Image (cartoon, rainbow, N blue to C red):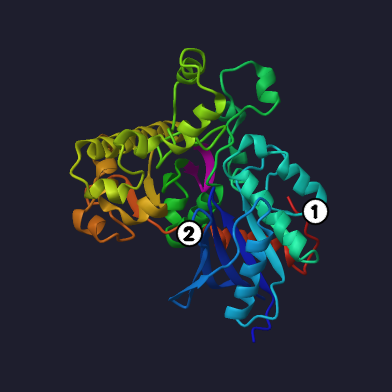
Amino acid sequence: MVNRPILLTFNPGSSTIKLGLFAMDAAGPVRLGHGAIDLSQSALTLSLVEAGKATDIPLSSRPDGDLHAVIEEMLVQLTSHFALDDIAAAGHRVVHGGDRFSGPTLITDETLAAIEGLVPLDPLHQPQSVALIKAVAHLRPRMRQTASFDTAFHRSQSDLLRRFALPRALFDEGVKHFGFHGLSYRFVAAELARLYPDIAKGRVVVAHLGSGASLCALEGGVSRDTTMSFSTLDGVPMATRCGTLDPGVVIHLVKQRGWSIEQVEDVLYHRSGLLGVSGISGDTRALCASDDPKAKEALDLFAFRVSREVAALANTLRGLDAIVFTAGIGEHQPEVREAICNRLAWLGVAIDAAANAANRPRIDAAASTVAVLVMATDEEQVIADEAYALLLPPTDGPSEPA
C-alpha cells in the first residue's frame, strides 16, 4: 500500500479529462501515473499509464450534467488500481481566472462561486471545471481541492497589451486580453530556467501548438504578450477554432445571413480552423498524410499565421533569442516546425534538418542566430506543484494563497 498522501489532478478539455496521480513527498509531488477519459465516446474508458505500462479500464457509468457517476467510478478504479487507501486532495486546471485570480487558490464555497461566475467568459472549458469540482465535493466533501488558472500566468502583462481599442468602460468591466495556456507556459519557463538558464534570461517565444494553439512572448521567463486574448478563439487557427477573425464577419453572419449567436458560436469553435479550411480533418497528422490540395492549404495557412505571430511577439520583445515548440504538434511534428521556421529565415532562424526530423531538444542549425528548441510540456505537474504549495506550506513561515 502507498502510505504517502496522494494528490489527483484534473486537466479538463471541452470533452476530455486528463488525470495526474502524484505522491506528496516531503520534497514535492512525485508522479505515480496519468490517465484520461474521453467523454465523447459512447462507452467510456479510463486509460491509465503507470511506470510506462498502459491499461484501459472500461467504465459502466455515462457522462451526465454533474459527472458524479463518472467521477465516483473513476475514483474507485484509481484507488483499486494503485492500491491506495484514498486520495487526499485534488488539484484542478481552471482555464479562466478573470481579474479575480492572479495565482492558485484553495477551493471554498466563495471561490467556487467566483469560478462559476466566469463561465460566460469561457463557455467551452469553464463548465467542465465547475462540474468536476462539484462532483469531487459531492463525493468526497472532506477532500481539499485547489484551482490553478491558465490566465494567471499572463497577469504580468501591461494594461497597454491587455487593452482593446474599445470604450474604456468595457476594459474596466473585464473586456480585455486575458491569455490562456498559462500552465503550459509556466512549466516551459521553469524548464528553460533549469536546462538553458542563459536562454531563459532572454527574449523567447513559446509556441504551444496542439488542437488548441497559442504563442507567448517571455522576457526573463515572464509573460509579456500572448496571441489568445479575451477568449480561446483568438490568435492562430487551431484544429477546429478560427483564430483571429474580423468581427465584421460575425456581424455579417448575424445581420445579413440571419444566423443565431448559437450557430456562429458552433462554427467558430467547432467547424473552423484546420477542419474548416481543409474540409478533411482538424488533425495535422491527417493533413500531412493527405494528398488533397485543401489539406496542404490548411497547413500552409497554419504555418503562415504561426510565423506571423512569432514576428509580432518579437516586436513586443524588441528582439528574439529563442523559439520553443511545445504541445502535441510542437513536440511531435517536424514538418510543421520546418514550415514555420522556413518563413522566419529573415529573422535569422535556421534549423538542422536531421535534428528536427528526430525531434531533438535543440534543432537550430549552427548558422542560426535564434535558438530553436523542442520541449515537452506538463500542465499536470504545474497543477500538482501549485496544489502542493497551498496544501503543504513551508514550515519556516506563514503562507497565504495568491
Residue 305: quarter of image: top left
Q: Is residue 341 magenta?
A: no
Residue 171 coordinates in the image, percent (x, y): 66, 24
Callout 2 secondary element = helix
**Residue found at x 52% / y 31%:** 265
Q: Residues within 10 Å of mark 1 (few under 14, many from 20)?
A: few
Residue 394 coordinates in the image, percent (x, y): 74, 67
Position of 355 with respect to 154 (left or right) is left
Q: Residue furthest left?
A: 291
Vertical comparison of 144 with 127: above or below: below
Residue 118 coordinates in the image, percent (x, y): 69, 38
Q: Residues within 10 Å of mark 2 (few under 14, many from 20)?
A: some
Residue 92: quarter of image: bottom right
Depth check: give the residue in front, 214 or 274.
274
**Residue found at x 69% / y 60%:** 68
Which numbered mark, 1 or 2, is in the foreground of this view?
Answer: 1
Majority SS type along the magenta span: strand
Q: Residue furthest bottom?
A: 1
Q: Is residue 218 magenta?
A: yes
Q: Amino acid at mark 2?
A: Glu
Q: Quadrant of the N terminus?
A: bottom right
Position of 300 with respect to 258 (left or right) is left
The residue wearing badge 1 is 108
**Residue found at x 62% / y 83%:** 83
The span shown in magenta is 217-225
Residue 234 visible here: no
Position of 384 with respect to 317 (left or right) is right
Depth check: give the residue in front, 54 or 26.
54
Residue 398 coordinates in the image, percent (x, y): 81, 61
Residue 46 visible here: yes
**Residue found at x 36% / y 43%:** 282
The residue wearing badge 2 is 191
